[in-house]
């Protein structure tokens, strides 16, 4: 590093740069973990490779305390064996080395040798020279983008926002639009309808009342080419309050294809109807098996803005049963 290298304290004291430093530490650490896991399993994330020795199994979250603040990490999990990044081991100077590399990128651009030394300092193995070079370009690109924005706009005009603020602005929404709730009547059926768009299509949940039948749940899932899986996967669950409560309806759920949707419906007991009516959210999940970590279907839709409708609907009609 050169004599004019900006020291860490000066970097962290400037709030926009502190956010950048934290973000870049997290980005670089997670990219390095992905590369190391790819080398250990014989294939990168999502890569089809006959030489793959183990499948991934999601992530576990862990906070990493650094001198730039708390960095939230997502550590890859494996179905067979285990993985734990060596840089989280006590007494390893990995965080200091990683921070130094990000500082170098900030001030004068980053070198492949610096990233190569970083990989060694973090105790990581199996990462090739070409992968180091690509990571070097990614780090440099992110830092340059930040500096270009910062230099083009007057400091007083820049508003630094966190994730919570971005969620309020609906910039970050997890890929889901807000839920629209309404009470409707059709085909001798009354129902509360919830609708939402997401990265996986347009979905609907209906909390229904049919005279002579009682309360019924309907889920309409935009299939997007996954009709076979939605119709054939064995496990079907109603999920209430996020995933805090899962009601297995596999043996009583009826499924059919309706246009671009796969429809799932089942009759509800009085207690199940009450749980939905007074819930924070509800939806339906379809899995290949009860143990499968990945689901198709409708992640629980928020009832915010429609709770009074749901509670009144249930309260008025449950008298009829």
Image: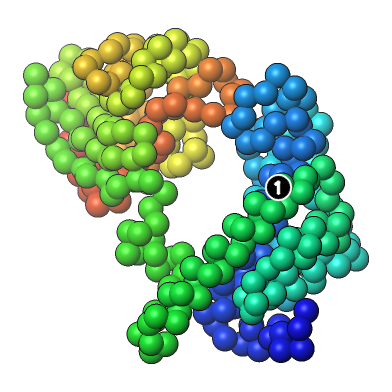
Residue at x 83%, y 62% (from the top left corner): 117
Residue 94 left/right relative to 238: right
The answer to whether residue 30 is seen in the rendering is no
Task: Pick the quarter of the image with the N terminus.
Answer: bottom right
Q: Secondary structure at mark 1?
A: helix
Task: Pick the quarter of the image with the C terminus.
Answer: top left
Q: Percent position (x, y) of residue 30?
A: 67, 53
Relative to 131, say whether 22 is above or below: below
The answer to whether residue 136 is seen in the rendering is yes
Residue at x 64%, y 72% (from the top left corner): 109
Q: Which residue is mark 1?
A: 131
Q: Percent position (x, y) of residue 315?
A: 23, 38
Q: Tell me the crowding category of disc 1: few under 14, some 14 to 19, or many 20 or more residues within 10 angstroms, Cα based.
A: some
Q: Percent position (x, y) of residue 238?
A: 42, 27
Residue 257 left/right relative to 116: left
170 vs 141, nearest the viewer: 141
Relative to 113, say whether 155 is above or below: below
Relative to 306, say whether 299 is above or below: above
113 vs 82, nearest the viewer: 113
Q: How many discs mark residues in the rendered view?
A: 1
Residue 143 left/right relative to 220: right
């Amino acid at each position: 590093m050169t004599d004019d290298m900006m020291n860490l304290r000066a970097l962290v004291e400037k709030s926009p740069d502190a956010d950048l430093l934290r973000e870049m530490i997290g980005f670089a650490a997670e990219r390095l973990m992905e590369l190391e896991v790819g080398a250990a399993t014989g294939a990168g994330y999502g890569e089809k490779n006959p030489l793959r020795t183990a499948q991934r199994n999601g992530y576990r979250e862990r906070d990493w305390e650094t001198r730039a603040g708390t960095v939230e990490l997502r550590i890859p999990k494996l179905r067979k064996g285990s993985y734990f990044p060596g840089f989280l081991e006590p007494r390893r100077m990995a965080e200091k080395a990683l921070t130094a590399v990000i500082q170098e990128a900030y001030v004068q651009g980053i070198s492949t040798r610096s990233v190569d030394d970083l990989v060694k300092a973090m105790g990581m193995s199996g990462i090739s020279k070409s992968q180091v070079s690509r990571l070097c370009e990614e780090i440099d690109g992110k830092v340059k983008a930040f500096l270009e924005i910062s230099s083009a706009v007057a400091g007083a005009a820049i508003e630094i926002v966190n994730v919570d603020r971005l969620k309020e602005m609906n910039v970050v929404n997890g890929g889901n639009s807000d839920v629209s709730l309404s009470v409707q009547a059709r085909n001798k059926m009354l129902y509360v309808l919830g609708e939402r768009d997401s990265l996986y299509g347009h979905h609907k949940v209906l909390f229904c009342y049919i005279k002579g039948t009682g309360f019924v749940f309907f889920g309409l899932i935009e299939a997007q080419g996954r009709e076979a899986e939605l119709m054939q996967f064995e496990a079907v669950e109603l999920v209430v309050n996020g995933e805090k409560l899962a009601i297995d309806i596999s043996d009583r759920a009826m499924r059919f294809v309706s246009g671009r949707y796969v429809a799932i419906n089942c009759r509800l007991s009085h207690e199940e109807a009450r749980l939905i009516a007074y819930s924070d959210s509800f939806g339906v999940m379809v899995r290949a098996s009860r143990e499968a970590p990945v689901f198709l279907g409708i992640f629980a839709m928020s009832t915010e803005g429609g709770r009074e409708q749901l509670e009144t609907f249930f309260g008025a009609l449950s008298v009829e049963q």
